Amino acid sequence: MVTFSNIVKYAWLVPLLPFAGFLIIIFFSRLLKGKSSGIIASALISLSFLISLLMFFAQSDSAVKSITLNIFSWLDVGALKIPFELLIDPLSLNMMLIVSGVGLLIHVFSIGYMLHDERFNTFFAYMNLFSASMLLLVMGANYLILFMGWEGVGLCSYLLIGFWFKNDLYNLAARKAFVMNRIGDLGFILGIILLFFTFRTLNFSGVFAQLSAFTPNNSTIVIITLLLLVGALGKSAQIPLFTWLPDAMAGPTPVSALIHAATMVTAGIYLIARSSLLFNLAPFTLDIILAIGLITALFAATIGIYQNDIKKVLAYSTVSQLGYMFIALGLGVYSSAIFHLTTHAFFKALLFLGAGSIIHALSGEQDIRKMGGLKKKLPITFLTFLIATLAISGFPPFSGFFSKDEILMAAFARNPLIYVLGLFGALMTCFYMFRLLFLVFYNQFRGTPEQESHIHESPALISVPLIILAILSVVGGFLNFPEIFGGKAAQANFLSVSLTNYASNAGHMAVSTEWILMAVSVLFLLFIVAFAYNRFIKQKMLPAGDEIPLAFIPKLLSNKYYVDELYNWLIVMPYTALSEKVFPKMELNIIDKTVNSFGEYTMWLGEKVRRIQAGNISFYVFAMVTGVIFFIIINLYF
Amino acid sequence: MKDMSVALKFIPLDHYVLLCIILFSIGVLGVLYRRNTIIIIMCIELMLNSVNLLLTAFSVYHSDPTGQIFVFFIMVVAAAEVAVGLAILVMMKRNIDSVDINLLSRLKW
């Protein structure tokens, strides 16, 4: 049996293998024909998954739960000492298993999904690079390595959103995602700098060890946590930096599943959970996180109700679910946030892959108004999609029920109003998910007859990952089976080594209250499903076509509250106007002129001096001898 | 051998230095003012040998053989250099039928 301390020595292979895959595929792109690059990429990521799994099992037998693996001394300049270290502890193992496990399934799915794309190899190179960066992000033992992975995943996100770069709109979406993330990253960088100046180290353990010297709500800690929060807001698509995520659906569907649902967008949640001790000292920041999470969860859910693009619905649903994780973080129950992150990774990846399977079957159609009646034709996709819908809506015993319930219980313990708002959001989630399900799979097919004749269940490469994810979506809740059902809250105990939940919210409620709240939420959910059933199956209501004018609220919601327009008016337009004003003065008169006159002066000088080069050897030798004599004289007399 | 170096020391070092300066200057001026490539190569050899002479003289006066060993290296390099120089000269004669250095000015601006 391998021991934990032995297997951890190979932890560096986990991010390195996918990175090697990236290098292999990008450099030997021309030699790799057919599915080979997809197979290489999947094989390497599965090795990473295997190592992570081995480490997980070795760790559960071991008394030591957390090991820091020093790989080499990276930066060592004066007071700045940053070793390249990996931290293998329950939290990073949890994340590694999600990233490599879900990543593996999505890689396999992509082999089937992207097979006919002309840039098949490049796609897998980027996917592997993404996996490597994400694994580095969750394994780094200090903030700088975390940041390195953070930037890596941002880059891959940009590359993959703009993967079909021949479409200008997709390029704009990629650029938008990148710029929005940069705003968040700036906050993160400032946070790291301030961390270093405060603690003189960037190691997690080093920072947390010094925290006892600070009182709660110490202004420095609050500023640091707020800056880290800005980074998390950008990456995890929370208000006010959320508008990039729905646009990011321009990328291929597996990308949406892996990067923009299951893993990358959870990096912000990981960052805050990892810094739980830091955030516990800043209750002020926690309250802000709570408020942002709550607003985002509701805001995005309302938009989701009126979207007609299957991927847009799921995108707003992701934003909303990330809002739930932020609520959990804001309440200080970090383990619940990670629990919801885990189950969300399963069912949201499944939803996106299911959507991919549908889009694949309909040869590119994404508008739910043109779908319908797919239940018989895509039985596997339907069944897995149904499971994911039940899971995300929070029906027991599917995984989403347990994770969402944990967050709502913590909210109730803090303040019943937060619980009510959270439950309201959950009901909206249920509504738009069942709206999607009913519109896509029930009634009659509404597309063209030509599309109808093409519909086929996807090949095994696509359907097997769906089935595995569906199983995980069903049983995922038992990872952290709550005590009230006789479980042991296994994941929360597992994570307790790395996470410290905020003390004031730890108070337990009476068991009866908990039962009543669960019953209430399930009853409401059933009511919502009945409502959606009545509306979309019995009455066969359809979302209105684009040309029909809408009433005020539907119009507001289907236009996403005009947030994009607001940002455009508030930031982009003044900036463009300013640039146009400054361009002729600054750019043309000062910068261009300076640069150009350097060039012109050099040309003028060359014109004068070139006459010396007359081709007369005697003259050259003469110049040389005079020069030598000149320097000898200088040496002798000065 | 010892007698030889004693005999050499009868001539003051100044004389050697002066002779070498004269030889070297003749070499430099030859390179500067002559147009015939053969003469220029000969002048370069003159400069090299004046330096060799000086090295030997100092070597004897300091009773340090390093200088004399160094001279052998210079001779070898000089021989190689002459071989290359003469080869260039032959090619020059074949191509432009002349050894006038001033005719080789095609690479000017």
Image (cartoon, coloured by chain):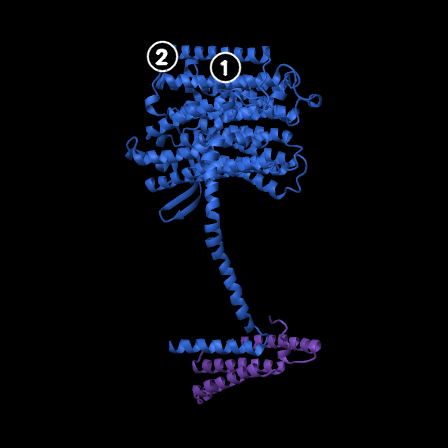
Chain colours: A blue, B purple
> Of the residues tagged 1 and 2, which is closer to the observer?
1
The residue to which callout 1 is attached is A395
Instruction: Say what secondary structure mark 1 lies in.
Output: loop
User: Residues at badges 1 and 2 in contact (C-beta under 8 Å)?
Assistant: no
In depth, the one of A95 and A380 nearer the eye is A380
Quarter of the figure with the C terminus of chain A: bottom left
Evaluate whether label 1 is on the same chain as label 2: yes
Label disc, if present, on residue A489 of the rendered structure: none
Q: Is residue A457 visible?
A: yes
The quarter of the picture where residue A107 lies is top right
Label 1 is found on which chain of the structure? Answer: A
The quarter of the picture where residue A500 lies is top left
Instruction: Compute the Cα span from label 1 to label 2.
Output: 22 Å
- Can you give x and y, in whole percent of width and height, for residue A401 in the image? 47, 17
Instruction: Say what secondary structure mark 2 lies in.
Output: loop
What's the amino acid at mark 2? Answer: Ala
- Can you give x and y, in whole percent of width and height, for residue B107 in the image? 62, 71
The residue to which callout 2 is attached is A510
Q: Is residue A210 visible?
A: no
Q: Which residue appears at 45% of the width and 22% of the height?
A: A298
In depth, the one of A276 and A326 nearer the eye is A326
Label 2 is found on which chain of the structure? Answer: A
Q: Which residue appears at 49% of the width and 60% of the height?
A: A598
- Can you give x and y, in whole percent of width and height, for residue A275 in the image? 39, 32
In depth, the one of A257 and A250 nearer the eye is A250
What's the amino acid at mark 1? Answer: Phe
